[in-house]
Image: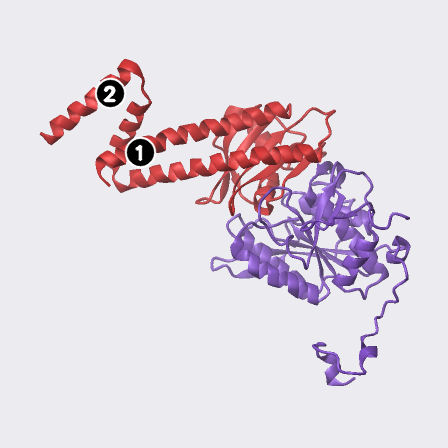
Chain colours: A red, B purple
Amino acid sequence: MTSDLRAAVAAGVMASENAHRALLQSTVEVARGIFSAQAATIFLYDDETDELVFEAVSGLGAQALLGNRIPSSTGIAGWVLVTRQPLVLEDVSHDPRWGGQEIAERTGYTPKGLMAVPLINEEDSVGVLQVLDRPQESRFSLAEMELLGLFANQAAIALDLLRKARRARAVLEDSDAQIGALARLAGEVERLEGSKRQAGLDLIRSLEALLTR
Amino acid sequence: MSSAEHLPAWSLPAGSAESLELPTEWPGRVTREWAWGDSTGKGVKVCILDSGIELGHPMVGEIDGAVAVEVGPGDEIRVVEDAEGDLCGHGTACAGIVRSIAPDCSIFSVRVLGAGFTGSGTALLGGLRWAVEQGFHVINMSLSTTKSQFAGMLHEAADAAYFRRTVLVASAHNMPVESYPWRFSSVISVGSHEEPDPLTYYYNPKPPVEFFARGVDVEVAWLAGGSARSTGNSFATPHMTGICALVLGMHPELTPFQLKSTLYLTASNVDTDD
């Protein structure tokens, strides 16, 4: 791949990674809003470490949770990931170890109930969407389960694209560290606007003229 | 007994139709009274293929045993005694639902979760094969895989179960994805209805989902002797498993085909006189 092409690809990859992250964040915000929930989270499955990662969080404990990891096949999220079955649990009693433990341990906030749905893209289970603590008076219906499933489809596609963008970036960076840096620079310039963008482009053109003279 | 009687009946020679006499005398009309009457599921061995079962949970009571399926680095399967209990709560919930419907059935836990996500399809298949070999009467599978590489092998295992008189009761998916084993016609596939009666179930004339059972707002057993209210096809499935245990407690000789026929004839939208 020529460096020009590589820079162009990297600019696209980095821009899309940010866009997909924003889409995931938007999905958890909307899910939380629609179900009047205290919080909503999306876990991404990391196949290199066999763990679930908090990839997007809205509501209580959001900052404390982002980026945290849990084992892939334990707890509610693990069960949903492995079995591909959505489930709803409310009024969970007695046990601090139940599926909310991963949240409780890190935020001090112990959810009493949740809805969890697998994020399935083609054959792959790529993550889990959870909606935590809806209002006590509401009772969950099958129609709501279907609504959550629709959100899950959207989130699964965004999550899959995010994974692909990250892999593409890793390939670019691994293939040549210096050119990777240049690609990142091109990506940054791509995001600038107005006079800043013009200044960035001028700088790159000057650099190119200098190096190719 | 001649050795020929041990062979499968591949064909039916002339004049031997009486050899096919059925051990069960079917009534003119199959009712719930005939199907399970006052059965408690006694004598029926139920396997919960799930996340394990918490020992001593008051809503589950005694269980007959528990194993865990482990997957080695070369995808080899090991089935070992399970001392972990339940890693999630879900297996305990399913066991509690079966117990609430068929209080005297025997319950055995085969844990296929906990080995990581990477080996989960292999563990599911290995656990199912192991359970079929043990000769359980009913296997509750509130789980599925979307990996097509397992579809063929799961299909073979489901058919093997069917011919060995082991009934597989599997959760249908309520999302538009292909998953297994619930789509196979040799299993009893279950979705949810929203009614509160645990013995209300419907036959669905538009498969692949064949039956709808109670799956919304169900009080279930959860970890540390606790409970939770739950919703999902994975909770509808053990309702059908419990009903299967009741019928097999009354009529232990039924084949999976006959059992499914009985469920059809006694479904709430079919036998409307009950």
**Among the 4 quarters of the image, the one containing residue A95:** top right
Q: In which quarter of the image is the N terminus of chain B?
A: bottom right
The residue labelled by disc 2 is: A200
Could you say where residue A4 lies in the image, as x and y percent from the top left? 23, 34
Could you say where residue B123 lies in the image, as x and y percent from the top left? 57, 55
In the image shown, does B78 or B160 lie closer to the viewer? B160
Q: Earlier in the sequence, mark 1 or mark 2?
A: 1
In the picture, measured across the screen, residue B268 lies left or right of residue A72, that is right
In the picture, measured across the screen, residue A82 lies left or right of residue B35, that is left
Q: Which amino acid does label 2 sit on?
A: Gly
Disc 1 element? helix
Q: Which chain carries label 1?
A: A
Q: Distance between the residues labelled 1 and 2?
A: 16 Å
Task: For residue B60, say whether it is visible.
Answer: no
Respond whether the residues carrying marks 1 and 2 are from the same subunit: yes
Residue A147 drawn above or below residue A59: below
Could you say where residue B210 lies in the image, as x and y percent from the top left? 72, 51
Callout 2 crowding tier (Cα within 10 Å): few <14, some 14–19, many ≥20: some
**Among the 4 quarters of the image, the one containing residue B30:** bottom right
Residue A90 drawn above or below residue B27: above
Task: For residue A103, say whether it is visible.
Answer: yes
Q: Do the residues labelled 1 and 2 touch (CB within 8 Å)?
A: no
Could you say where residue A168 lies in the image, as x and y percent from the top left? 35, 39
Disc 2 element? helix
Tell me the residue at 67%/44% (across/down).
B90
Callout 1 crowding tier (Cα within 10 Å): few <14, some 14–19, many ≥20: many
In the image shown, does B146 or B177 lie closer to the viewer? B177
The residue labelled by disc 1 is: A10
Q: Which amino acid does label 1 sit on?
A: Ala
Tell me the residue at 59%/59% (across/down).
B154
Tell me the residue at 67%/57% (across/down).
B185
